[in-house]
Amino acid sequence: MDAAFTAEQDEIRRTLRDLLARHAGPGEVRAAVRTAEGHDPALWRRLAQGLGLPGLALPEEYGGAGCTPTELALACEETGRALLPSPLLATAVLAAPLITALGTPSQRAALLPRIADGTLTAALAVPGGSTAAALGLTGDNRAAPWSGGGRAGGIQARHGDGGWRLYGEADRVLDGHSAGLLLVAAHTGGYPRSRTLLFLVPTELQVRAEVSGGASTEAFTDASSGTEGLTRTRLTSLDETRPLARVELRDTPAVLLGADTEAVDVCGALAATGRTAAAVLAAEAVGAAAGALERTVAYVKEREQFGRAIGSFQAVKHRLADLYVRVEAARSAAYYAAWDPAAGPLALAQALETARTVAGEAVQLHGGIGFTWEHEAHLYVKRAAADELLFGPVHRLRDHAAVRAGLFGDVPAQALAHGAAL
């Protein structure tokens, strides 16, 4: 492994950091999360069309840059440093790889170029808010009942003369309220031969035409020109920079992602996406931890007590040194995971733990001002806590990684499923 970054990778990091320093300060972030989209659409267009951010890891034949997950991780480290609210994670890290892996040639040709240029955003909707379980981060997603099952529970899909129809509900869907395309994990096949498949539910008229292959889109629309049977509600979330939504499907038309054959391995594709997503999320969490640490170091250099800067006190220096070691260790793990995504879940566990520790210490070292609503320190605390709720918890990430490594010997499938459900 060559640990040195290329000139192109360094340029991606530098350019993005400079841009976000100018346009994504604490004030801009607070304003962006209060928009209907939950992010700044103008900045997103600039990141997508000017820097090609959502297409970094997409193949060149679909308008992407053809880069590796390392470049995407470096970009997300910088967005994490700024706590940038954007559709990048939901679209480029979770949805696009699944379309690439499972989509038919026509689906990939219709959707991926628009994802690459930022004109289409997408979101992964799984029932029960079980994103970590669906991605295989906290348990075996083949054994765990994360998608519901049997004759009820989760999201159910049925096939009739008019095509596929979905019924059910998904909570805590990242960017689900604003995405132009939903990738919905639904249970199908009935009780004896049940299995989980992914379906495309377009929410924009142009996307409906693309998904339906140019055929009539009447089956997708109701009288109000919305997608039939689809209700999306933005939820009040702990971290406003991670907008979440509840997606309700009531006999909603959908298009199967990929081919309807027994050879389609949806759980395998979700697990592969989860490993890469974990590496990218780890880099993003490291960026958030580094951002909190940098702001804290700058503060203790300026804040004076007893006639001297509080950063000159030995006790404060020791605390900051410990935080610096944690951040650098987590950064090394995240970079390694970007090179080898198999290490993604462990790197994510270390990064989430580091982000939580650094954010908490940042509040403490800022003193009284760190507890105020007006200061940005609480934003880092919320990001650390929300990410662990969405993609953890840390002890489950480590437990499943240990099981996969064989540290506990052979573990029954029932135990794997139980661990994922906790």
Image: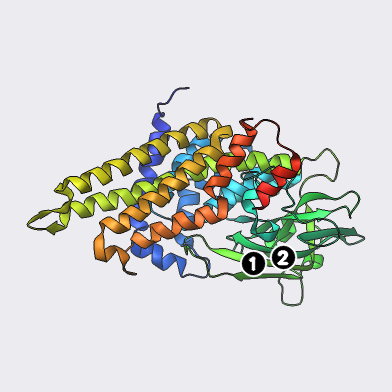
**Sequence order check, earlier mark of 1 and 2:** 2
In this view, 314 is above or below 36 = above
Q: Horizontally, is 146 left or right of 306 in the view?
A: right
At label 1, which amino acid type do we have?
Arg
Measured Cα–Cα span from mark 1 to mark 2: 7 Å
Q: Position of residue 37 (x, y in %)?
A: 53, 66
Q: Secondary structure at mark 2?
A: strand
Q: Which mark is residue 229?
A: none
Looking at the picture, tell me which residue is in the foreground, 40 or 51: 40
Residue type at mark 2: give it: Glu
Q: Is residue 182 left or right of residue 392?
A: right
The reply to whether callout 1 and callout 2 are in contact (CB within 8 Å) is yes
Q: Residues within 10 Å of mark 1 (few under 14, many from 20)?
A: many
Q: Residue at x 57, y 60 (%)?
A: 175
Mark 2 lies on residue: 169
123 displayed left or right of 355: right
Q: Position of residue 285 (x, y in %)?
A: 45, 47
Extreme residue in the left direction:
307
Left or right: 420 as drawn, with respect to 309: right
Q: Could you tell me which secondary element the residue under label 1 belongs to? A: strand
Q: Quadrant of residue 397?
A: top right
Q: Nearer the viewer, residue 250 or 109?
A: 250
Hey, which residue is sitting farthest top in the picture? Answer: 1
Q: Quadrant of residue 407?
A: top right
Residue 246 is marked as: 1
Question: Percent x, y for residue 217?
Answer: 78, 64
Whether residue 406 can be seen here: yes
